[in-house]
Amino acid sequence: MPERNLDFDTVINRKNTDCLKYDFAVRRGLPEDVLPLWIADMDFRTSSYIEDALTDRAKHGVFGYSEVKTPYFSAVHDWLKIHHGWETQEKWLVKTPGVVFALAMAVKAFTKKGDGVLIQQPVYYPFSEVIEDNGRRIVSNDLVYGDDDRYHIDIVDFEQKIVDNDIKLFLLCNPHNPGGRVWTVSELQQMGNICVKHGVTVVSDEIHEDFVFEGRHTVFASICREFEDISITCTAPSKTFNLASMLISNIFIPNTKLRRKFRKQKDASGISQLSVLGLTACQTAYEKGDEWYRAMKSYVRENIEFTRQYIAEKLHGVKMAHHEGTYLVWLDFRGTGLSHTELDDRIINRARLWLDSGNIFGSVGEGFQRINVACPRATLVEALERIRRYVID
């Protein structure tokens, strides 16, 4: 049966579906009629193979405790090997209900209250939340925004922050959200060598690994045995196949000692078996979803290029960060002369848009906005037109 869901232009009404993106603006303090391009899920129907597999499983009618066998691992393994050149082992795998959950478990497993945990702001805001909410301290090796509109790592500051704060855990965002960087092998090696030198465990959030448009994604743990030995690698089908509510992530921990500590913390949280529908969706996605994935990625690539051209031609004072990966585009409004509070007000109350304000990614994000371009072109055009009319003009 051929893939049916390859139409990415049709606008699908997601309202009144208990959708966090569309149904909760008022509860979040925003006008009810905002157009949402904030949270990182896509406005596309997932692969028809996944739809069919979920329907067939639901028709069985029995939803008791469920687990998976080797074919599940084989599907995940083959995807990672084919798309990212990474060879994994089944014993490394720990399944969790999400990558953010895994980040929190790592913070609890590998640090104690009061410890500093290293991140690189501006960065995905749950990184900060799982640190502070668990009584640890945020230590940021702030990324440097260059004249080339790209983020760079201050590697001297990176090591200094580790030494000065006795850092034992580093949360790496690879590819980087929201900055759009796809870290090079050289950049990862520099950071990894320092972490090995100082005994720092690295949790590498690689959930956006399937969205690389420039360069090539490198799994941090794949670079060398020393990096593998200090790594917790977080992967999931949720971004790639729009399955966030399925609550399934695949965490790979080659080091036995680290894996035992992580499992112990996960067990202490009360999590054991996961949703049978999430497990079904994940295995089907990796076994049968490649055609849909490639078509979707091509469409998103075109949306990114459209955004780049639109900004250059029509949004004076706005720059788009050089975009290498993810479907989340980082916009620099600092050239408009608006303060970050004025910018937020115009975007929300005049343009009636719901984006992610840069300051939630850390103070170095002030003056930026993150926009999700994994949507039908008509939605993207409407959003950019609203920015032009109500924020810039």
Image (spheres, rainbow, N blue to C red):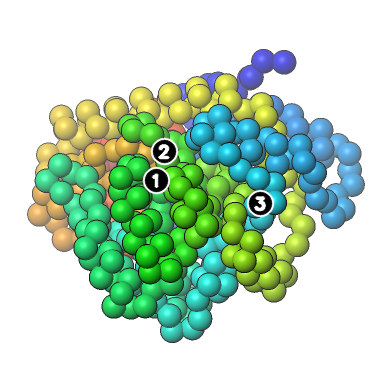
Q: CA distance from mark 1 to mark 3?
A: 21 Å
The local secondary structure at tag 3 comes to strand
Residue 385, position as x, y percentages in the image: 26, 35
Task: Tell me the quarter of the picture where residue 185 sits.
Answer: top left
The answer to whether 39 is drawn above or below residue 10 in the figure is below
Binning the other alpha carbons within 10 Å of mark 1 as few (below 14), some (14 to 19) or many (20 upward) gives: many
Q: CA distance from mark 1 to mark 2?
A: 7 Å
Q: Earlier in the sequence, mark 1 or mark 2?
A: 1
Q: Residue furthest bottom?
A: 114
Q: CA distance from mark 2 to mark 3?
A: 20 Å
The answer to whether residue 227 is seen in the rendering is yes
The three-letter amino acid code for the residue at tag 1 is Pro
The three-letter amino acid code for the residue at tag 3 is Leu
Residue 255, position as x, y percentages in the image: 59, 59
Tell me the residue at 43%/67% (across/down).
Answer: 200
Residue that badge 1 annotates: 175
Q: In the picture, which quadrant includes the C terminus?
A: top left
The local secondary structure at tag 1 comes to loop
Residue 276, position as x, y percentages in the image: 77, 47
Q: Which mark is residue 93?
A: 3
Q: State yes or no: discs 1 and 2 in contact (Cβ < 8 Å).
A: yes
Q: Residue furthest top?
A: 2
